[in-house]
Each structure stands twice: as C-alpha cells, then as structure tokens.
Image: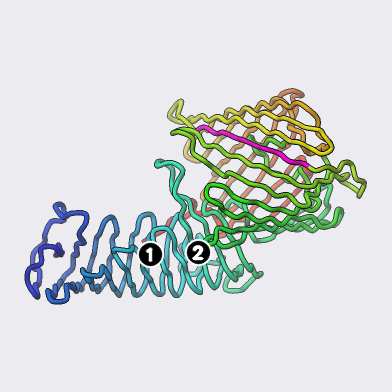
Amino acid sequence: MRQWPLFLSVAGLVLLRAPLSLAALPDSFAAIEADSVAFHLDTETTHASGDARLTYRGLELCADDLTYDRATGEVTATGNLRLIQGPRVMFGESLSYNLNSEEGVLRRARAVEQGVIITGEEIRFSPQEAVARNAHFTTCDRPDPHFAFAAERITLTAEEAPTSAAPRRGRLSLSKGRVVYRGRSLLPVPGYTVNVGDVGTGKGNPTPILGFSGDDGPYVSIGYTFGSPDRSLTGHFSYQYTTSRGIRGLLGARRATGPTELTFGYYRRQDPGDRPIDADDLEASLANVLVNREPEYGVVLPAYRVGRFFTLQGSWLAGAYTEYESEGIEELAQADRSSIVLLARSDAYRVSPSVRVSHAIGWRQSNYRPGDELTALLLRTTADMRLGSRLDFQLSHVRRRESGESPFLFDGVGPSRQLIADLNWTVSPTWRLRLVEDYDLENNETRDMILEVTRTAHCLEYTLGWRSQRRALYAGFGLALPSAQEYGE
C-alpha cells in the first residue's frame, strides 16, 4: 500500500512507488493512500485510484476512486465506498463531501449508527444529522430484512451525551412512513419519532398491541411519537379501544425551548394502572379510576446536569382534571390542579465488580382549586447487579411521604416503603425473560407484577406479557433491539 501526505507535494504530477508513514502527519492535513496517486499542482487537486483511503481528523474514507480539492476541501469518490465519521459507518456508490464543513451526500447509501440501519437513494449527512430520502430503517443486517419502516424522509439526529463517559443518544424521525413486512405495507405511519435507545423496547412502537384484561375485556392499542426534530417539535398519540370501557386515549405535544420543553396534552379516560412500574414515580397510586385531563399544559426540564455526578429533572403542569369510577360514568371528583415536581438523580457508582448503586430524591407540590394541597417526597436507592453475562437484576428501595389532602384518588403516592425488583434474563440469543415486581413493605404483599417473554426471530421481536394489577394478558411485535444484532462489515 502506498500513501501520499498532501502537504509534501512539490511537483505537478507524482506517482508514488513506496509507502510513507502517517505517524508524523499533522492532524490539520488530509492524507491519502492508494495504489496510484496523482497530484496536480496547478489546480491543487489529487486523484487516487485502487484501494484509495483518505484520512482527516478522525474521518476515514475508503473507495475505488477519489478526488480531493485542497483549495475547497471538496472530496468526490466512487466504487465500494465506506465512510467512518465518528460512531457512524456509511456505505454507498458515490460520494460528495467537504472536509471543511463536514457535510456530504452519499447516493444509494446505507448508514449504520447506534445499531440502527438506514438505507436510502440519497443520504445527506453531517456529524449531527443524517437525512435519507426514499428510505427505510431496520435493526436487521441481512440483505432482505423481513420487517422495516419505510418513509419519504428519515432523519437521524444525534444528541450530545449528558456526560463524556456516556454514549451519544439519537432521535429517529419518519415523515410519511409505513410499516413494511416482507415487502408488503401493513399500515401507514404519517409521522413517527423515537429515541434510538428505545427502538426494540416497545416504547412508542407504532405496531398494535392486542390484549385482554379484567377491566377492559378484549382490547387493541397503538401509540407512537411523531414530529419534526429540526423544528424541535414533537407530539405523542396513544389510542386504545376496549370492548368493556370504550375508547381511551391521549394526544400531546412538546416544543423545545432551550433546555426546557413546553408541553400540551389532552387525556381522555386515562387509567392510572396503565402506567409502567417506575421507582421514581411520584404518582404511584393504583387507584381503580379513570381520569380526564382536559387539557394539561406546562413546562418540563427533561435533564440538566448539576455538577459532575447529578442530573436534575423538573416540571410545572396545570390543567382541569376529572376523576370517574373505573366502571361507569359517575363523577367522583373535579378540580383544577397545578403541580411542581423536582427530581435529582445521582450517577451510578461501583461498589463491587458486578454492582453499581445510584440514588434519587424527589419532591412534588400539588395545589387544587378550591383550596386543597398535597406535598409528596421520595427517596430511592437502586442497586444494579450484573449476575453473569446473561442476567441483570435491579433492586430499588423506595420511601415516599405525603402531607396534605387531594380530592383525587389517582394523586396518591402509594405505600411509604416499597421494593421494586426488575430481572432481565437472556435465556438464549433468541429468548428473553423479564420479571418486574412491586412489593409493599408496609403490608408485606405484592402490589403489582409484570412477566414478559420475548422471542427474537430475524429482525422481529414477539412479546407475550401478563400484568397482575391490570389482570391483563397482552401480545405484540416490533423491531428487535439493536444491541441484539451485529452490524457493519
């Protein structure tokens, strides 16, 4: 392999015949390796062919043929393209890229980042964003994935990690999309946005979930996040049709304004028992009621770093609330409500090779018209244990205190002491088991339990679950977790 440091060129046309070391090459200059390299002094352009490789400030480009204009920073390349830009790996037929602006266009392209694979006729990209036209995304690295999301436009936006040690997160957004299974469109998805880390976890999965519960009877539910990341505006839609209690759903929107978000939501017949089991939940009541929030609006601080070890979350929410009997239409309570929530979390620290510990402290102040108020406090300590290569166990001890009164049953904070256990067992490469238990330490009884069995087949995951508090059995499918696949070439 021969290589050519561009800043050493002093001739009009030079053919390299011997390898040169890149070790002493300054970071501010590009370097090229190839079987044949020609430099044109009058135009300051370099043409390389035959296993060509260009490196520049951490970027690496491999191609059969490439041309570099030193004056403008423009690079064009064709044939067996592979571009590595930070955590992103891209493949394609032809490339136009500018080393100065770090922006480019890749045609007939495939991008792999954070376990998600995006394929499109054209991908325009920068370190912060990749936009694909007439594209689809999946988590399957096979040539013909069974399951994918297709769209006129797919945008992958990278967000900086909260700490230097944490991986970068990303947000995936589809415009005018559809769910595709074995080449056939299953259902349209006008807009869809999901955090890359949530792909494969069921959060915001736009595929339907079928189930049966003691309260709802047979039901079908669907929900997903949609929006436009470039305009910092996203929305969330969730719909559930039940044979026993009718239609339930919510529609919400968020708009980023600096470090905070403005929120708006309209909730119809919300069941508090549908909430996930969360050790940091300051509204942990399991009251068997239905709630309308018409509307609810406020300001949310998603995450704000305080010092080196703490993250602060906060919100101010207000709206008109109505509480009904779980079965029937009898109104139990109605009031205007505003609440302020602050939650501080510590980063996890290691206490042994396989155990990490973290803490949280939370406060909520709720005020109601005509005059009641309720204050809630939360203290949480969590131990994350890695029990072998296939078994993860998380145990949280939670203490909650409340003072004052609320006109609503759903606003309670649950038991004063509880344990929440979350066990994830990878039985085999294709089978996973998850068990979550919410245990009341005051009454020595299980409040709620979730048992889920997941099977991975090709790029799909099929989940069968049971939840005790809802007396529910449910089933669904969606994309497999990116971490369960192997990517790249």
Nearest the eye: 123 or 51: 123
Which portion, as a residue range, is magenta?
337-346
In the rendered structure, does residue 340 fall within the stretch colored magenta? yes
Please state, as top left, top right, bottom left or bottom right, where the N terminus lies in the image. bottom left
How many residues crowd mark 2 within 10 Å: few (<14), some (14–19), many (20+)? many
- Label 1 to label 2: alpha-carbon separation: 15 Å
Q: Amino acid at mark 2?
A: Thr
**Which residue is identified by label 2?**
155
Label 2, secondary structure: give it: strand
Mark 1 or mark 2: which comes first in sequence? 1
Considering the whole magenta stretch, tell me its main secondary structure.
strand
Point out which mark residue 367 bears: none
Give the residue drawn at x 33%, y 63%.
Answer: 101
**Which residue is identified by label 1?**
90
Give the residue drawn at x 52%, y 56%.
Answer: 171
Residue 209 visible? The answer is no
As displayed, is residue 73 above or below residue 421? Answer: below
Residue 22 falls in image quadrant:
bottom left
Q: Amino acid at mark 1?
A: Met
Give the residue drawn at x 75%, y 26%.
Answer: 403
Give the residue drawn at x 69%, y 58%.
Answer: 237
